[in-house]
Amino acid sequence: MKRFLRDSNRWIVLCLLWICSILFLTGCGRKSKEQIISKVDTAMGTIIQQTIYLNLTDSEEENKTAEDIIQLVERLEKQELSWRLDTSMVYQINQNAGAEEGTGLLEPLALELEQVLQISEESKGALDVTIGDVVRLWDIDAYCAGEKQDFQLPASDEIQKALEGTGYEKISIKDQKIFLPEGIHLDLGAVGKGLACERIKAYLEEQDSVKGAVISVGGSILTFGEKPDGTAWKVGIVNPHDTGNDIGYLTLNGQWCVSTSGDYERYVEVDGKRYHHIIDPATGYPADSKVSSVTILGKDGLITDALSTACFVLGVEDGLKLAQRFGVEALFIDQDGKQVLTEGMNHYFGI
Ligand code: ADP
Ligand code: MG
């Protein structure tokens, strides 16, 4: 009998402890609530679409992630990438072209520019971030934006002259300093959106409340984390011959970057001929590689964006080799609508 009481007492004590611990956990535990933010803005001259899945603590009343991201992109443009604004690093670098002492670079831009120059080299100049003067001569963007009317084909001697002011190989980076010879200018239009995706990714990694996000900066898309229901991200691939529709989509889990370059994004048509915004640095004319769009899938947005432009210029055969060298997946759609994929891309692409 005594023993029974001792045992039952022990049970009562254990049960009381268990009840107390549940009360303690519910009382002090941080309850959380799920929230989805969807936002569309323009920044860096492009459309930014965000869908962010949050897990907010009870004490968190308002979440500013989406606004912070827009500010981050605006700062990136204003302080680092713009070739127009005198507040930016690129503007300073161009101003100092020819100066013996070069221009000091801050991280992470120093490393990013080194990566861009490496891709320029690996692509044998198909990506050339000094192509700005030729781009401006064609000025396709201005015609597309309605800032200029009556499209004029540049004369071939003008193109040759503008080409003389190009050449990524004339740029060097040493000890966190960049050196440009006189007459050479940097223009990061081909990599800015992917670079923005990388900066956004670094910001999201520090946000405890963000569980997942899909964010597009123009033609570069970042997927991050997971959706609360555990389903995969779906990223549509635009049909370049019917831009209102997708030809299929990528099914992605976790963090990826997808960049697309296409001849349908910005172009002018004259007498049935399309003049688009991606220039072949070897000729100074819009790239004539028989490709209508290239989509690159990889982990790093700067690399996918740089490679999408380079592969568009190179065309299917050399573009595939370049993509393989960088360990990314690629999907080419040529002017006849034929699709060519790297082997790995088949795991992600579906109709
Ligand atoms: P988008 O900017 O539409 O996403 P891309 O990433 O392919 O497309 O970049 C195209 C932009 O890059 C052009 O608008 C121009 O400013 C610049 N550009 C064009 N051709 C080249 C090239 N061969 N190398 C580097 N930059 C280029
Ligand atoms: Mg690009």
Image (cartoon, rainbow, N blue to C red):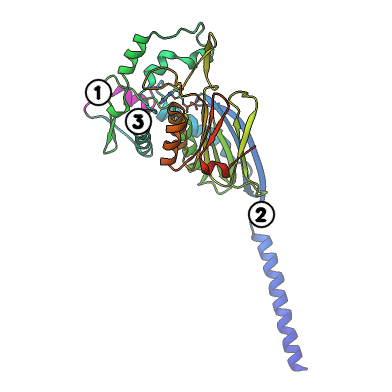
Where is 120 relative to 298, above or below?
A: above
| Residue 230 within the segment the image draws in magenta | no
Tell me whether circle 3 and circle 2 mark residues in contact (CB < 8 Å).
no
What amino acid type is highlighted by mark number 3? Lys
User: Considering only vertical position in the picture, is 166 above or below 72?
Assistant: above
Which mark is in front, 3 or 1?
Answer: 3
* Residue 75 visible to an observer of this rendering: no
Mark 3 residue crowding within 10 angstroms, few (<14) / some (14–19) / many (20+): some
Label 3 residue near ligand 1, CB within 8 Å? no
Which SS class for mark 1? loop
In the rendered image, residue 40, in percent from the top left (x then y), is placed at 61, 30
Q: Nearer the viewer, mark 1 or mark 2?
A: 1
Residue 99 versus residue 338: which sits nearer the camera?
338
Dividing the picture into quadrants, the one containing residue 124 is top left
Which range is magenta?
A: 85-100
Q: Position of residue 117 (x, y in %)?
A: 34, 33
Question: Does the Cβ of the disc 2 residue fall within 8 Å of ligand 1?
Answer: no
The circle drawn on residue 98 is 1
Between 203 and 148, which is closer to the camera in this rendering?
A: 148
Q: Quadrant of the C terminus?
A: top right
* Marks 1 and 2, the one that precedes in the sequence: 2
Instruction: Return the residue at label 2.
Output: 31
Report the amino acid beneath label 1. Gly
Residue 26 marker: none
Specify few, some or many for label 2: CA neighbours under 10 Å numbering under 14, 14-19, or 20 or more.
few
Q: Helix, strand or loop at disc 2?
A: loop
- Identify residue for label 3: 124
Give 268 or 113, whichever is nearer the viewer: 268
Report the mark closest to the observer, 3 or 2: 3
